[in-house]
Image (cartoon, helix red, strand yellow):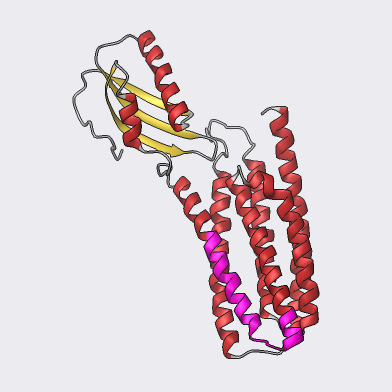
């Protein structure tokens, strides 16, 4: 790992730790405030903040483990741990959202009077603390799925706090208490919306699905334009993590080439795969005159 990569990793870890600390404070304050005020939306915001603490801690551990070196027992090291963390964090968003929807429906049927002043001040605290956390993680979230999951948790919670603030103001000045349940329902629907996309993307990586932006037929067409290649088959393409895309394939050659000739052709293959498809790790099995299955995709 280069010095700049190590420095960047340390900054990510520091920012995650600051965000964890801020969310622990918010969670404690909102749980106490929600119980005192009777606000379900404030308690739902506190529950979401608790999930933030858990997700941020998972993200922090995953970020640290991902830097560990490979070994004979773990030949890829922990490169996929951040994808797993993103999947777990996205799943918690969806589960929490379902729980909030159930509770909001119950509260709609039996609305309670709420101490709105406490709701207003604590929601302001949530906006400030989560806003700071969002700013800390925004840059790295664009290039890292694990940090994106943490960023989404924090960003949605900041929006939730804004909604709770608006609800607190409406309850204070108009005494419309059912708005608390409505806001909880809106927060939950938004959680499902943002959580599902991340859950789907991390699931695809974990299941070794071909990335959406890569079409195997296009890869075969490009490689078979090289004069020495007769056929490309047994193709598998997957992401190890967000920076490594792997391909393995069998290539049938037009003639019985030497190893040195294969090395030269392999350089051409690597160039095509990297520049046209951003595939940066390949494993090719060369063949000549080999009978048997020539299907493009084979379930091994």
199 or 85, nearer to the observer: 199
Image side of residue 103 versus residue 262, left or right: right
Q: Position of residue 171 (x, y in %)?
A: 72, 84
Quadrant of the image for the C terminus?
Answer: top left
Quadrant of the image for the N terminus?
Answer: top right
Q: Is residue 176 above or below residue 146?
A: below
Query: Can residue 50 be seen from the camera position used here?
Result: no
Image side of residue 296 versus residue 239, left or right: left
Q: Residue furthest left?
A: 291
- Identity of the residue drawn at 43% across and 22% down: 270
Q: Which residues are magenta?
A: 169-195
Say if the magenta span includes residue 63: no
- Identity of the residue drawn at 71% across and 75% down: 166
Query: Can residue 147 be seen from the camera position used here?
Result: yes
Q: Position of residue 54 (x, y in %)?
A: 66, 59
The kind of secondary structure the magenta stretch mainly shows is helix
Say if the magenta span includes residue 187: yes
Q: Is residue 58 above or below residue 232?
A: below
Q: Position of residue 163 (x, y in %)?
A: 67, 72
Asked where in the image residue 247 lies, by quadrant, the reply is top left
The number of numbered badges drawn on the structure is 0
Q: Is residue 41 above or below residue 278?
A: below
Asked where in the image residue 119 lies, by quadrant, the reply is bottom right
Q: Position of residue 76 (x, y in %)?
A: 53, 34
- Identity of the residue drawn at 43% across and 47% down: 207
239 or 184, nearer to the observer: 184
């Amino acid at each position: 790992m280069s010095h700049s990569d190590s420095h960047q990793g340390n900054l990510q870890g520091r920012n995650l730790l600051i965000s964890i600390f801020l969310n622990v404070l918010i969670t404690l304050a909102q749980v106490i405030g929600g119980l005192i005020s009777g606000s379900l939306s404030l308690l739902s915001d506190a529950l979401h903040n608790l999930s933030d603490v858990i997700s941020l801690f998972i993200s922090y551990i995953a970020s640290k483990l991902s830097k560990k070196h490979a070994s004979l027992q773990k030949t890829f090291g922990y490169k996929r741990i951040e994808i797993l963390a993103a999947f777990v964090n996205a799943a918690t968003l969806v589960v929490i959202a379902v729980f909030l929807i159930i509770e909001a429906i119950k509260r709609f049927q039996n609305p309670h009077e709420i101490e709105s002043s406490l709701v207003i001040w604590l929601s302001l605290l949530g906006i400030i603390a989560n806003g700071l956390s969002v700013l800390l993680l925004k840059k790295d979230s664009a290039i890292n799925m694990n940090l994106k999951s943490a960023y989404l948790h924090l960003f949605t919670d900041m929006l939730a706090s804004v909604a709770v603030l608006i609800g607190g103001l409406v309850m204070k000045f108009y005494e419309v208490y059912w708005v608390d349940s409505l806001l909880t329902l809106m927060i939950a629907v938004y959680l499902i919306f943002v959580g599902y996309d991340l859950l789907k993307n991390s699931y695809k990586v974990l299941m070794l699905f071909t990335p959406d932006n890569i079409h195997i037929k296009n890869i075969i067409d490009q490689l078979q334009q090289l004069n020495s290649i007769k056929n490309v088959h047994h193709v598998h393409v997957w992401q190890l993590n967000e920076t490594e895309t792997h391909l393995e394939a069998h290539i049938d050659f037009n003639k019985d080439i030497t190893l040195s000739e294969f090395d030269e052709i392999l350089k051409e293959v690597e160039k095509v795969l990297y520049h046209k498809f951003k595939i940066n790790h390949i494993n090719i099995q060369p063949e000549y005159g080999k009978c048997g299955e020539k299907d493009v995709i084979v379930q091994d």
